[in-house]
Amino acid sequence: MRLANELYRDSAVTAPSSSPTSAISSVSPGAPDTFAGIPGGVPGTAGSRSIFPDSFAAFPTEKPDNPGLAGGYPLATTTAHAPIHADQVEALGPPGSGNALDSGAHQQDSNEVYPFGEPRCNGSFRAREAYADTVESSPLFYFLREGDSRTGLRGQEPQAGPPLSGLEVDTIRKDFPVLHQRVHGHPLIWFDNAATTQKPRSVIDATSRFYSRDNSNIHRAAHALAARATELYEGGREKVRRFIGAADTKEIVFVRGTTEAINLVAQTYGRTHIGRGDEILLTVMEHHANIVPWQFLAEQTGAVLRVAPINDAGELVLEQFVPLLGPRTKLVAVTHVSNALGTINPVETIIGMAHAAGVPVLVDGAQSAPHFPVNVQAMDCDFFVFSGHKIFGPTGIGVLYGKAALLEGMPPYQGGGNMISDVTFEKTTYQGIPQKFEAGTPDIAGVVGLGAAIDYLSSLGMPAIAAYEHELLEYATQALSSIRGLRPIGTAAVKASVLSFVMDGLSNELVGRHLDRYGIAVRSGHHCAQPAVRRFGLEGTVRPSLAFYNTRDEIDVLVRALHDLRRR
Ligand code: PLP
């Protein structure tokens, strides 16, 4: 498995420049170090490679003086900590019985801890069925049943884990209050990071401080708090600009999240530049947020969606992507990292090929921005979108980056206050970019929190985060391979963060609920990427997904819990 930073360097070497034909030949046999899936490319599937300091040369410099960073960044060294295997696992009793999963946690209230009744059963078929039934009928999970929209869960208390190379994770974990709680009597293990990430104290405090001290609407009033709030909001824009390496703050538009950003591009750029018979090129591994807005556009305009296939490992098949890039292609919209499979797409190569054909590219960065350095100028994408809540910031705030020339040519998305320059009943003129796209009062506190999240990530260093998570992912991949009947889904040579799998004979929901009983939060289901999951003949997977505050010890607990489930 290769590290994102390496790819960044490699793809910069191999990105094609002139025509589609030359684009293909530039990634053909003889190319120095290309991606699996590229014709003649070097698959590079086995094991991790060492990472060289120059891998990071292209990235914006990060502060090396972060207290959570051991000896500056990076780098990954192989650790002596071996994953556990089936034969090392003791028979596990129920949570709280002092079993191997029980790191000292003891339940006070057995009804709360065992919402499904006594969980241990003897492994017979009937016992397994009964276990599944009790889990599946639990009222705790009403929200998994269609039509039931009540909300609310619970938990409380602390725990920490050992460091891998690069980051002082014990120290880092102290920054995340939510991690210090017990769920069903066990320390919470948050492996649902692809859905949303937890927030460091600095983000929580920045948001709270804004409302306690600085709250005002922005841009319009001549008073002290308006000036402060405006400064914080526009300061947040500058932090985002630096975080993704954009040329100018006017290229940074605040939106609600990735979903809104893609809808905005579809309804403004798309409605202006894409018409009947034109084609929008996607991949099978897109999140629904990067499918449905294009379907709306296709319905509205008569445009057509083209979909590039993926192989059995979950990698984009570039040989088949290239011919889909035809004379009618008006936009490529591709995810940087698949939320269901973990695949890191060779976006620089894709962008090079698309540009050679005169086609702009939107990159869905929802799952890349949290995990490795992103530089939109080096990538040369036309649009880049991501969500604040997936980069340890608040929900309800996200970013659309667009090249200035493109944004300037796009009509506004919504009309209202803040985005106008002059209004009469006869005619309205608009602000320039980015305000033209920010109608109404924005999520000012959200931007403040997002800025604090970016400060936090910058203090750790995105290269160090990438290196740490890469080690953790490799460790987890190996550890999960010890579980009988576990089939990994998404085995790309180049991956980030995600460990999707299914288990023979067990529903994904059952596995998810079993893990929850040990305080382990994973996602089970289709992950809003149904075409990707169906490509593997499935309707869903179980998906643990990692972040830099996760540890090997947590992975060991996950693996033991899965061995335990298998034994039942
Ligand atoms: N794209 C990808 C790859 C995602 O993983 C997600 C969320 O999981 C989205 C888009 C949508 O993000 P949001 O719900 O924050 O708008």
Image: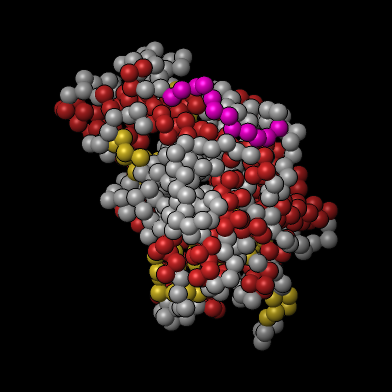
Measured as percent of width and height from the top left, residue 345 is found at: 49, 53
Horizontal placement of 538 versus 491: left or right? left
Q: Is residue 392 magenta?
A: no
Of all residues shown, which one is farthest toward the front?
30
Q: Which color scheme did the rendering employ for the protein?
A: secondary structure
Image quadrant of residue 5? top right
Task: Identify which residue, 466 or 107, lies in the foreground.
Answer: 466
- Residue plotted at (47% across, 36% down): 47
Measured as percent of width and height from the top left, residue 26 is found at: 54, 62
Q: Is residue 430 above or below residue 351?
A: below
- The magenta span reads 72-83
- Residue plotted at (45% across, 66% down): 322
- Residue plotted at (34% across, 15% down): 90
Measured as percent of width and height from the top left, residue 456 is found at: 68, 39
Measured as percent of width and height from the top left, residue 31 is found at: 53, 56
Of all residues shown, which one is farthest toward the bottom?
426
Residue 379: in sight, yes or no?
Answer: yes
Task: Identify which residue, 89 or 128, lies in the foreground.
Answer: 89
Q: Where, quadrant-wise, is the C terminus in this rendering?
A: top left
- Which secondary structure dominates the residues rendered in magenta? loop
Of all residues shown, which one is farthest toward the top?
98
Residue 530: in sight, yes or no?
Answer: no
Image quadrant of residue 216? bottom right
Q: Is residue 563 above or below residue 371?
A: above
- Residue plotted at (41% across, 31% down): 478
